[in-house]
Image (spheres, rainbow, N blue to C red):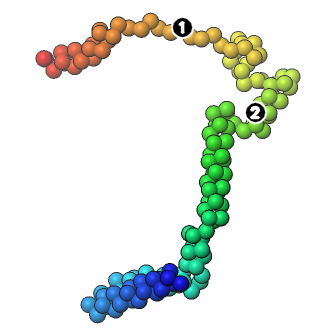
Amino acid sequence: MIAETVCSAVSAAGLGIAVITAYRKRYLAAVRVAAYALVPIGLVMTGVVEWLADTAFSPTAWAGFGVLGLAWVLFITTRAVERRRGGTRKERRAAARAAERPGAVAPAASTPGLAQGSRPAAAPRPAPASRGDDDFSDIEAILKKHGI
């Protein structure tokens, strides 16, 4: 009941502002203000305000929003895990079946010279350069270029 009264007052005030704006010969702005002013009363007439008021003060409705939030978090978590594993279960099964078929090229054996299921040897890591020389060599080159 209070929400309907507030919405009606807001609409009346908005229509008053629209009339004042139209009196000042700003008709386009007046029509726009009138359109905005009619929204609250339209929401009251359709019953949306009553539904929102009932929902805002209903513990069951808030519990429902909590359940929806939990469902959303679970969905997002499963999508993140799915991406991390490299696809859906269906995609992984299809890849495993393709690897089991004779004559099929398995994803691990696509590199020439590797046996099926073996991993390539790790590439040797280059020796780390000394930090002092490597860090300032670029700076020294820039300073020499500018004659400093």
* Position in image of residue 116 (x %, y %): 77, 16
**Which residue carries the number 1 mark?**
124
Q: Quadrant of residue 58?
A: bottom right
- The residue lying at 57 percent from left, 70 percent from top is 57
Question: Which residue ends up furthest to the right in the rendered image?
Answer: 102
Q: Earlier in the sequence, mark 2 or mark 1?
A: 2
**Mark sitting on residue 3:** none
When the figure is inspected, residue 75 is found, relative to residue 19, above or below; the finding is above
Which amino acid type is shown beneath numbered disc 2?
Arg
Side of 23 where 46 appears, left or right: right
Query: In which quadrant of the rendered image does the C terminus lie?
Result: top left
* Spatial CA span between label 2 and label 1: 31 Å
* Position in image of residue 25 (x %, y %): 28, 91
* Crowd class of label 2 (few under 14; some 14 to 19; many from 20; radius 10 Å): few
Which residue is more in the foreground, 99 or 65?
Answer: 65
Mark 2: secondary structure: helix
Residue 31 makes an appearance in the image? no
Side of 11 where 113 appears, left or right: right
**Which residue carries the number 2 mark?**
92
Residue 45 makes an appearance in the image? yes
When the figure is inspected, residue 78 is found, relative to residue 36, above or below; the finding is above
When the figure is inspected, residue 119 is found, relative to residue 88, above or below; the finding is above
- The residue lying at 35 percent from left, 90 percent from top is 16
- The residue lying at 72 percent from left, 14 percent from top is 118
Mark 1: secondary structure: loop
When the figure is inspected, residue 63 is found, relative to residue 94, above or below; the finding is below
Side of 95 where 135 appears, left or right: left
